[in-house]
Image (tube, grey):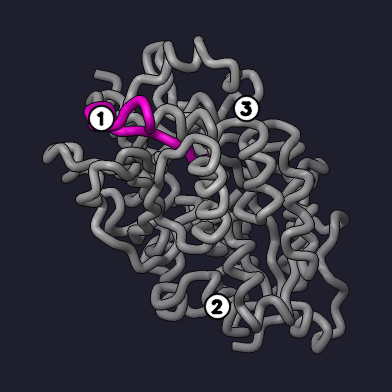
């Protein structure tokens, strides 16, 4: 596992509702595997990215003559279906991979080994991608996915609420203390600091937080500020309320002047035992090309993992100050991961609720989470 000691510091993003799963969107999908043996099946979980990716896939089909069928499966069902598909031999030909599950899929020979193909490719050079993102999909010196994108976290805020309160909008001068003071003024209804300054003073009741994700609270005018990732841009752009009332800024800086964002990135992977591995590789090679990665940014799908291709992304939603997300790229820490990320991440999020409800002190919760994580990591290393 990498950077696990920084995990507790990163939990502050979760406290304001930033999704640590990155790109976990809603969708209404189809079965994972198509019955058409002449079509490459491609599965994703974020319906917001479907229009742009469909256009990119059309370019691949025009160039190669290989047909592609896009399938959107909700995040909560996606991994269950992939695991069942791996056992039953019915995985889609190409699909998204996430750091929560990459170690498990790679170590169990579910993903097509791309090492030799990349070495022979005139299109793919791994030096062109963010090193940490590429590292998410490598195991024992082998590569199992082509980096698709990367994300950072920004501070989304409701301009209308700020105007009504007579407050200046968040900007690069903000510190965490500035955020706390603004939050107190906007409220109508190191972790101890977070609890004392925000949880007990400015955050919605835990029942409200439990029943609504932060994007829903922002999009319904019930939250003045949330920390959310760059993957939410399309959803907020297409939401009438957020498009008219909200914007995004960089995260506040700490007392020492540092401003840090966690980041993560998806990978394009292929079925190791599929019937169309050569065609699948051609698609992965195409999706990882500079041309396709630039297209992904231009269409507003998301920021791209290929270095230097995301500048045009800031224009995909001119109503928002998307440069904030690129600015957050200047100081990033890769989101912690291990072989069984989901196990300790779920535990940490469930346990953190006890601090928000007052059932446990914040420092006790943090100690409990750290002990559990250390135990899980020790078991992984055996």
Q: Is 343 above or below relative to 46?
A: above
For residue 196, what is the image quadrant?
bottom right
Indicate the quadrant containing the N terminus: top left, top right, bottom left or bottom right: top left
For residue 87, what is the image quadrant?
top left
Indicate the quadrant containing the C terminus: top left, top right, bottom left or bottom right: top left
Q: Earlier in the sequence, mark 1 or mark 2?
A: 1
State the residue position of label 1.
110
Residue sitting at 62 percent across and 73 percent down?
238
Q: Is 176 above or below relative to 278?
A: below
What is the CA distance from the residue labelled 1 to the residue labelled 3? Answer: 23 Å
Q: Nearer the viewer, mark 2 or mark 3?
A: 3
What is the CA distance from the residue labelled 2 to the residue labelled 3? Answer: 34 Å
Q: Earlier in the sequence, mark 1 or mark 3?
A: 1
For residue 332, what is the image quadrant?
top right
Regarding residue 201, the answer to whether it shows in the image is no
Residue 10 percent coordinates (x, y): 56, 46
The numbered mark at residue 129 is 3
State the residue position of label 2.
217
Regarding residue 234, the answer to whether it shows in the image is yes
Q: Look at the image and say whether residue 217 sits in the magenta stretch.
A: no
Residues shaded magenta: 263-279
Residue 348 percent coordinates (x, y): 38, 50
């Amino acid at each position: 596992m990498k950077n696990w000691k920084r995990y507790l510091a990163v939990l502050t993003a979760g406290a304001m509702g930033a999704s640590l799963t990155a790109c976990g969107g809603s969708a209404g999908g189809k079965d994972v595997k198509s019955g058409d043996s002449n079509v490459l099946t491609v599965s994703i979980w974020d319906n917001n990215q479907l229009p742009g990716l469909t256009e990119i896939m059309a370019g691949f089909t025009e160039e190669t003559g290989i047909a592609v069928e896009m399938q959107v499966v909700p995040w909560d069902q996606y991994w269950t279906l992939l695991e069942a598909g791996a056992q039953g031999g019915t995985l889609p030909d190409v699909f998204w991979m996430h750091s929560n599950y990459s170690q498990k899929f790679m170590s169990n020979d579910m993903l097509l080994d791309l090492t030799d193909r990349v070495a022979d490719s005139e299109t793919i050079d791994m030096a062109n991608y963010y090193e940490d993102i590429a590292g998410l999909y490598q195991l024992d010196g082998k590569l199992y996915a082509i980096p698709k994108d990367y994300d950072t976290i920004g501070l989304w805020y409701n301009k209308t609420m700020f105007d009504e309160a007579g407050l200046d909008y968040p900007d690069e001068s903000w510190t965490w203390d500035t955020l706390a003071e603004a939050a107190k003024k906007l409220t109508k209804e190191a972790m101890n600091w977070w609890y004392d300054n925000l949880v007990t003073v400015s955050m919605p009741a835990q029942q409200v937080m439990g029943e609504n994700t932060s994007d829903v609270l922002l999009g319904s005018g019930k939250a003045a500020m949330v920390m959310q990732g760059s993957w939410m841009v399309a959803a907020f752009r297409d939401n009438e309320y957020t498009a008219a009332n909200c914007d995004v800024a960089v995260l506040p800086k700490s007392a020492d002047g540092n401003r840090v964002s966690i980041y993560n990135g998806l990978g394009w992977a292929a079925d190791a035992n599929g019937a169309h591995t050569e065609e699948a590789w051609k698609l992965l090679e195409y999706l990882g090309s500079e041309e396709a990665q630039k297209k992904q940014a231009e269409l507003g799908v998301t920021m791209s993992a290929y270095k230097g291709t995301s500048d045009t992304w800031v224009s995909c939603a001119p109503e928002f100050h998307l440069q904030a997300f690129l600015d957050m790229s200047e100081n990033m820490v890769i989101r912690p991961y291990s072989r069984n990320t989901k196990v300790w991440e779920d535990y940490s999020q469930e346990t953190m609720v006890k601090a928000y409800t007052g059932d446990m002190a914040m420092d006790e919760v943090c100690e409990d989470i750290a002990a559990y994580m250390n135990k899980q990591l020790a078991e992984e290393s055996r």
